[in-house]
């Protein structure tokens, strides 16, 4: 099910931290299920993407330090 619009049509996992951080995203579970429409929005709407980047960073930092997050992603979104 799409995390954003809740559709079950054409949903795929999307790495929250893309580009050179794609592997770190997959390895650490920084993935969110999105339909094609929401996936496109993720890549074209900075505020929309920032919502997920912040959410995943907050969740990671519940059990890890900010320094550990920075070592993985090299940027804080908080």
Image: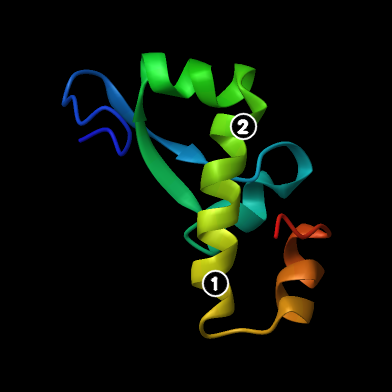
Which quadrant is the C terminus positioned in?
bottom right
Left or right: residue 36 compared with residue 21: left
Q: Residue at x 60, y 22 (%)?
A: 43
Q: Residue at x 51, y 56 (%)?
A: 55
Front residue of 72/37: it is 37
Image spot of residue 77 (x, y percent): 71, 54
Q: Residue at x 74, y 65 (%)?
A: 72
Would you call the spot at circle 1 few (<14 residues within 10 Å), some (14-19), or many (20 or more)? some
Q: Residue at x 20, y 31 (%)?
A: 6
Residue farthest left in this picture: 8
Residue 65 sits in which quadrant?
bottom right
Q: SS at mark 1?
A: helix
Image spot of residue 75 (x, y percent): 81, 57
Would you call the spot at circle 2 few (<14 residues within 10 Å), some (14-19), or many (20 or more)? few
Q: Which residue is mark 2?
A: 47
The mark nearer the N terminus, 2 or 1, is 2
Q: Looking at the image, is 40 positioned above or below residue 50?
A: above
Exactly how many numbered labels are in the figure?
A: 2
Image spot of residue 5 (x, y percent): 26, 27
Image spot of residue 20 (x, y percent): 77, 43
Between tags 2 and 1, which lies in front?
2
Which numbered tag is attached to residue 37?
none
Determine contact: label 2, label 1, CB under 8 Å. Answer: no
Q: Looking at the image, is 56 positioned above or below residue 45?
A: below
Q: Which residue is mark 1?
A: 60
Which quadrant is the N terminus positioned in?
top left
Distance from the alpha carbon under mark 2 to that under mark 1: 20 Å
Residue 38 sits in which quadrant?
top left
Q: SS at mark 2?
A: helix
């Amino acid at each position: 099910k799409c995390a954003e619009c809740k559709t079950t049509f054409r949903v795929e996992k999307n790495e929250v931290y893309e580009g050179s951080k794609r592997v770190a995203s997959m390895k650490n579970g920084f993935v969110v299920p999105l339909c094609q429409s929401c996936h496109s929005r993720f890549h074209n709407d900075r505020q929309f993407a920032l919502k997920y980047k912040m959410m995943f960073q907050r969740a990671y930092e519940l059990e890890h330090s900010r320094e550990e997050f920075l070592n993985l992603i090299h940027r804080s979104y908080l």
